Image (spheres, rainbow, N blue to C red):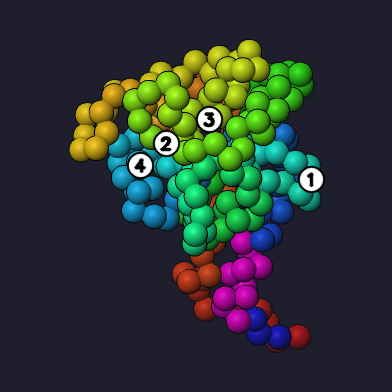
Amino acid sequence: MRIDRNLWGALLFFAAEIVAAQSFQEGDLIFREGTEWVSEAVRIVDDGPFSHVGMIVGSEGRWQVLHATPAERPGGSDIVILDDLAFFIAPERSRHFAVYRVWANTDQSEKAVRYLRSQLGKTFSIGNDEKDLYCTTLVWRAWQAAGVDLKTPFTYLNIPLISGEYLLPNVLSRSPLLTEVAQKKTISTKQTPNTSLPDQ
């Protein structure tokens, strides 16, 4: 039996997703390396592998990601949104992702998740103002509201269109209160080698 390369790539991708998802808990932070040009710009400024972050919510078999993002669907809005995990880490949006657990108790995790859910629908905005809301400040504020200081510094940037102090994804991932629990390289069906299984 021979399997089409695109189908084989898709099977490997979803197998990786299932294996990784076994380690998840509500409140975990999921970082990804995006595929858009803006993702590359973030990585260059931040000097690390990640360009975006969200928080995992839900339960096994129904994991979702709460995150602040520019619209990722045609006609969408730049807001705090709830997406299925599969959508968040799909190859067209993610080259690589990693999941980190915050050093916190159950009560604090529940408070962080409740705070994040309360932010659904709020406008995504990158600026040098306390009211601005983007991916890293969203999850950072959620844990602050739960009484957990992630001890991550803001980075001063002075580049075209952006000037001020910002919380960058890779800086956040290096918080002393975060521990990596899963990491996967997203498999793109466009780059899958011509692999076939032996005839049965």
Evaluate if marks 2 and 4 touch, with contact meaning CB atoms under 8 Å apart: no
Inter-mark Cα distance, 4 to 1? 31 Å
Frontmost of labels 2 and 4 is 2
The image shows residue 102 at horizontal and vertical percentages of 63, 25
Chain part drawn in magenta: 4-13
Name the residue at 79% across, 45% down: 60
Q: Quadrant of residue 148?
A: top right
Q: Earlier in the sequence, mark 3 or mark 4?
A: 4
Amino acid type shown at disc 1: Glu
Residue under numbered circle 4: 43
Q: Is residue 87 magenta?
A: no
Residue 144 vertical position relative to residue 160 in the rendered view, above or below: above
| Quadrant, the N terminus | bottom right
Front-lying residue, 167 or 161: 161
Amino acid type shown at disc 2: Ser
| Quadrant, the C terminus | bottom right
The label number, if any, that marks residue 60 in the structure image: 1
Q: Is residue 6 magenta?
A: yes
Q: Is residue 117 left or right of residue 133?
A: right
Evaluate if marks 3 and 4 touch, with contact meaning CB atoms under 8 Å apart: no
Q: Earlier in the sequence, mark 1 or mark 2?
A: 1
**SS label for mark 3:** helix
Q: Earlier in the sequence, mark 3 or mark 2?
A: 2
Front-lying residue, 161 or 99: 161
Instruction: Report if residue 5 is visible in the image.
Output: yes
Instruction: Report if residue 53 is visible in the image.
Output: no
Inter-mark Cα distance, 3 to 2? 11 Å
Q: Is residue 59 left or right of residue 123?
A: right
Residue under numbered circle 2: 125
Inter-mark Cα distance, 3 to 4? 19 Å
The label number, if any, that marks residue 138 in the structure image: 3
Inter-mark Cα distance, 3 to 1? 23 Å
